[in-house]
Amino acid sequence: MIHRNATSIFFGSLVFYALGQMPAANTAQAAACTFPSTHQPSLNLQRLDGKVRYNNNRTQNSLKRMQQKNGQSTAFGSTCIPVGLTVTEIKYEVEIKIEAYQLPNSKVCARLSSVDAKVGYDTISVFVARRFRPGTCPYQSIIDHENTHVAVFRQALDNYYPRIQRRLARATTTLQPAIYRTPPEAAEYLRKRLSAAIKPLYAEMGRTLKRNNARLDTPERYRSEQARCKDW
């Protein structure tokens, strides 16, 4: 009996900007890309716990192809066919708004105005091969195992969400204004700086998930779960 889980990381973004005239700004001020008033960008961070969706419509070969597509292996090697699979995507989406004004050299000075971000999982998909029907012992054994993977994903988010929140808040408040030729170029630079602050934590979270999920997918555990049922 082989189970497997798969994760990937998604980074997405949207950018909005407002271009205006710098009120009463002198040339030296503009050249330094400063604003006449201090401003703390607003931050709204939404946690996505992920709705769990169960699917009992796919064949074992279909699950195997999904597993291979996600670059996953099992404790028994690449030749084994999974009976269950848990798939999700670690998601980070950010939408930023900026303020910008035109400099004497026709470039723009821009700073963050607000950040709206989402972190977590949209959906956690749990698949059980369709030859194992609800109400049977093997089906329940597979579901019980896959739900332990769901718990791993939820626990990782519990652990990393506060750290991501603190890291993003610090990056949002310390990110300095930028000078670029156009507001979209400045906004893209600011967005990339925010993402760069978060990506190391996402990479660490991915490694933690891989390690903790692997602890559930061992030959010993599979044998124990298979021993629960006689009608495999």
Image (tube, helix red, strand yellow):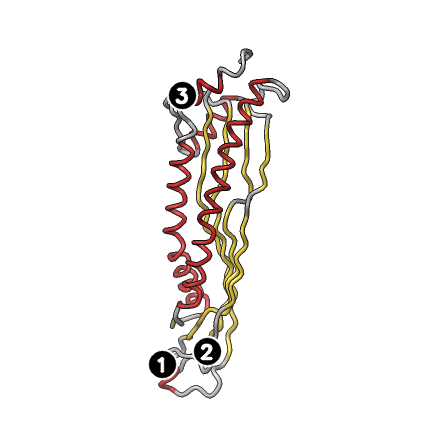
Disc 2 designates what residue?
Answer: 38
Under mark 3, the amino acid is Glu
Which one is earlier in the sequence, the residue at label 3 or at label 2?
2
- Do the residues bearing badges 3 and 2 touch, measured as CB atoms within 8 Å? no
Under mark 2, the amino acid is Thr
Which one is earlier in the sequence, the residue at label 1 or at label 3?
1
Identify the image quadrant of residue 111.
Answer: bottom left
The CA distance from mark 2 to mark 1 is: 17 Å
Q: Is 126 left, or right, of 35 in this rendering? A: right
Q: Residue at x 43, y 29 (%)?
A: 216
Disc 1 designates what residue?
Answer: 31
Q: Residues within 10 Å of mark 1 (few under 14, many from 20)?
A: some
Which one is earlier in the sequence, the residue at label 2 or at label 1?
1
Under mark 1, the amino acid is Ala
Q: Nearer the viewer, mark 2 or mark 1?
A: 2
Q: Secondary structure at mark 1?
A: helix
Give whichever of 85, 25 is nearer the camera.
85
Give whichever of 94, 104 is nearer the camera.
94
Locate residue 22, reporting x and y percent. 47, 82
Q: Residues within 10 Å of mark 2 (few under 14, many from 20)?
A: few
Which residue in the rendered view is the most extreme toward the right? 135
Q: Nearer the viewer, mark 3 or mark 2?
A: 3
Q: Is residue 204 above or below residue 73?
A: below
Q: Residue at x 39, y 50 (%)?
A: 201
- Do the residues bearing badges 2 and 1 touch, measured as CB atoms within 8 Å? no
Disc 3 designates what residue?
Answer: 220
Q: Is residue 30 above or below residue 125?
A: below
Q: Residues within 10 Å of mark 3 (few under 14, many from 20)?
A: few
Locate residue 137, reporting x and y percent. 58, 18
Locate residue 128, reporting x and y percent. 55, 25
